[in-house]
Image (spheres, helix red, strand yellow):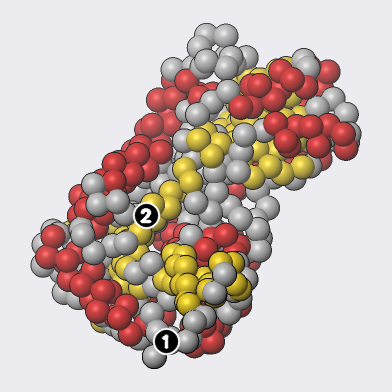
Amino acid sequence: MNSPRPLTNFVGGRRCEPTGSVLALTDPRTGVAFGHAAVSGPDEVDHALRTAEAAFRGFRRTTPAERQTALLCLADALEDGAEEFAEAECRETGKSRHQMLQDEIPQCADQLRFFAGAARLPEGAASGEYAPGHSSLVRREPVGVCAQITPWNYPLMMAVWKIAPAVAAGNTTVVKPAETTPTTTVMLAELANRFLPPGVVNVVLGDRETGRLLIGHPIPALVSLTGSTRAGVEVARAAADDLKLTHLELGGNAPALVFEDADVQAAAEGIAAAGFYNAGQDCTAATRVLVQAGVREALVKALTGTAAALTGGPGAAPGAEPDVGPLNSAAQLGRVLGLLARLPDRAFVHTGGHRVGDCGYHLAPTVVSGLRQEDEIVQEEIFAPVLTVQEFTTEAEGVRLANDQPYGLAASVWTSDHSRVLRTTAELEFGAVWVNTHGVLTAEMPHGGFKHSGHGKDLSAYGLADYTRVKHVMSSLTDRA
């Protein structure tokens, strides 16, 4: 029986035959390989970028209304093909079909529709006469060809987050998805090609070296990465050689501050939902639980019960199956098990902390307390269904602990005191701060971090602006022969 043909690049409106090596694609639920994807080398990357460059010459002159129509059609087509997209992404990520069909694909369609509308309402200074005898106007223009690298935790959604604003602004793109989860990105590019000129949306497949080739090539004007802080530093260094613009959405290690006046049960439910969703593989996941001393015991008990129920452990309904999907790969599972194996002796694992089953990459939802600020598992981004619990006494101490780590992507505050909300949200050094909720995103609001979580914004009008350049045009009002 012949093995299936490997997944290939999509460039210039068509799939390209692989010319080099391939990588195995593995179902993380079972650990069994089911297919292969091409690995792009220098020639393939160069071809994709030159194709995008040629397409940009014409696409940059399209009207916002034309780009809006294309994105709206793409949103409709994505919804029509939801079952096919869900099947492909679930196979590569281990997500549930419910998560894809009820949460992620509707959000993707909504985000496409938002940028379709935003394309027709660019922001800028008013035209006017600011110097005697001269009139000024400000143009917002596309930057050019965008090299975009997406992660494995939300393959389809992160492709939408990058392609939608780039196209809405009039750019062309070359996207490299994560090597373990490439399929839905290729499918999205094929779908987009039905409504956009060939070469506007292109996909190259491959590994880290493919990404380096993409970033180091002279054609891209902007490099956008969603990934680890390590990868972001590497991208920034490579882009600096050519002064490319960079848009970096990097790691996170989100604290959730629970004060004594909070609704403890609601806080536990919200934190668990945000910490265990997508197996905790989310840069905004509620990972570091900081709880005021008076409600520590009650909160830990509630979190532990929720986590245990999700694994079919104590507190679960009879015969319950685990309700948290697998980690992405054997390497990711091994990294997290290593963090848990190196816990200090004073740490206490209330539930979880171990692999589930003997196939696939499942980790039991975990709650750990007895930790200090300097502990590795507190300072590192875990990216797994693991909640660490630390105790604080005063508001100032809680905020200090929240801020005292290198990431600055997201945080949440749980309290019934409105004055405390105003104080703490002003002091927390994170790009997004939720109050009595965690992890809720909307297309109209910006998403992006501070410090080692990168710079630039996804979603919102701010996300669209990141894919434009600003030009001042000044004209003399004096008639000249």
**Residue 373 as seen in the image, left or right of residue 223:** right
Does residue 143 appear anywhere in the picture? yes
User: Relative to 54, does residue 324 appear above or below in the rendering?
Assistant: above
Pick whichever, 190 or 89, lies toward us. 190
What residue is rendered at 52% in x and 63% in y? 465
Secondary structure, mark 2, is strand
Marks 1 and 2: which is nearer the front? 1
Rounded to the nearest angstrom, the CA distance separating label 1 from label 2 is 39 Å
The quadrant in which the N terminus is found is: bottom left
Mark found first going from the N terminus, 1 or 2: 2
Circle 2 is placed at which residue position?
Answer: 245
* Left or right: where 75 falls relative to 177: right
Q: Amino acid at mark 2?
A: Leu
Mark 1 residue element: loop
**Amino acid tagged 1:** Arg
* 385 or 350, nearer to the observer: 385
Position of the C terminus, as image quadrant, is bottom left
Mark 1 sits on what residue?
Answer: 480
The residue located at (24%, 52%) in the rendering is 242
Q: Which x, y percent locates residue 136?
A: 53, 72
Total number of numbered discs in the rendering: 2
Residue 429 is situated, as x and y percent measured from the top left of the image, at 62, 34
x, y percent for residue 335: 38, 31
